[in-house]
Image (cartoon, rainbow, N blue to C red):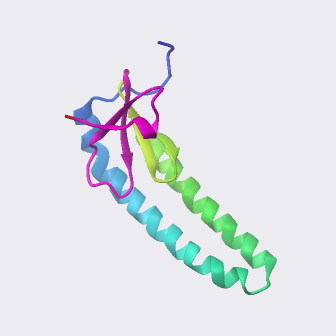
Amino acid sequence: MADRGTRSWSLATARAVISEVRRLTAAAVDAVDVLEARRGEVAGSGNPAALAALEQELSRAVSAWVRSMEALGVEVKGRWLIDFDNGRGYYCWRWPEEQLDYYHGYEDGFAGRVRIQ
């Protein structure tokens, strides 16, 4: 297997940071939800500059979440979706899951997730 250049997580270590992942993700989801709720109003205002500014705010909010996940050492695979590389595949978590309960191989992706026994 090629060196992926990422941290290798044990299940126990990955599960130990899920509460922080959930806390940071919940805050990001709340911020993005507020901005997305405003999108229709701003889009209907006929002000393209205001809409562009809102879209930039949305992008910054999601980017800040990505940076916070990367600072924890996890891999961001999509919006509110992260993986913990364990050297054989990934422990996989997605908002709003309460716990880290899924795994998939390197080639399987999200669609190939299976519950950890």
Count of all numbered marks drawn on residues in the image: 0
Residue 78 at what x, y percent from top left? 52, 47
In this rendering, is residue 100 above or below 52? above
Residue 4 at what x, y percent from top left? 50, 22
Q: Nearer the viewer, residue 107 or 43?
A: 107
* Residue stretch rendered in magenta on the structure: 88-116
* Quarter of the image that includes the C terminus: top left
Residue 57 at what x, y percent from top left? 64, 67
Asked whether residue 55 appears in the rendered view, the answer is yes
Q: Nearer the viewer, residue 111 or 5?
A: 111
In this rendering, is residue 34 above or below 63? below
Question: In the figure, residue 12 lies in which quadrant?
Answer: top left
Q: Nearer the viewer, residue 16 or 95?
A: 95
Residue 48 at what x, y percent from top left? 80, 77
- Picture residue at 39% right of the left edge, 63% below the top: 26
In this rendering, is residue 20 above or below 2? below
Name of the residue lying farthest toward the front:
111
- Picture residue at 46% right of the left edge, 27% below the top: 6
- Picture residue at 24% right of the left edge, 36% below the top: 116
Name of the residue lying farthest toward the bottom:
45
- Picture residue at 50% right of the left edge, 22% below the top: 5
Asked whether residue 73 appears in the rendered view, the answer is no
Q: Nearer the viewer, residue 15 or 78?
A: 78
Name of the residue lying farthest toward the left:
117
Name of the residue lying farthest toward the top:
1
Q: Is residue 104 magenta?
A: yes
Q: Is residue 12 magenta?
A: no
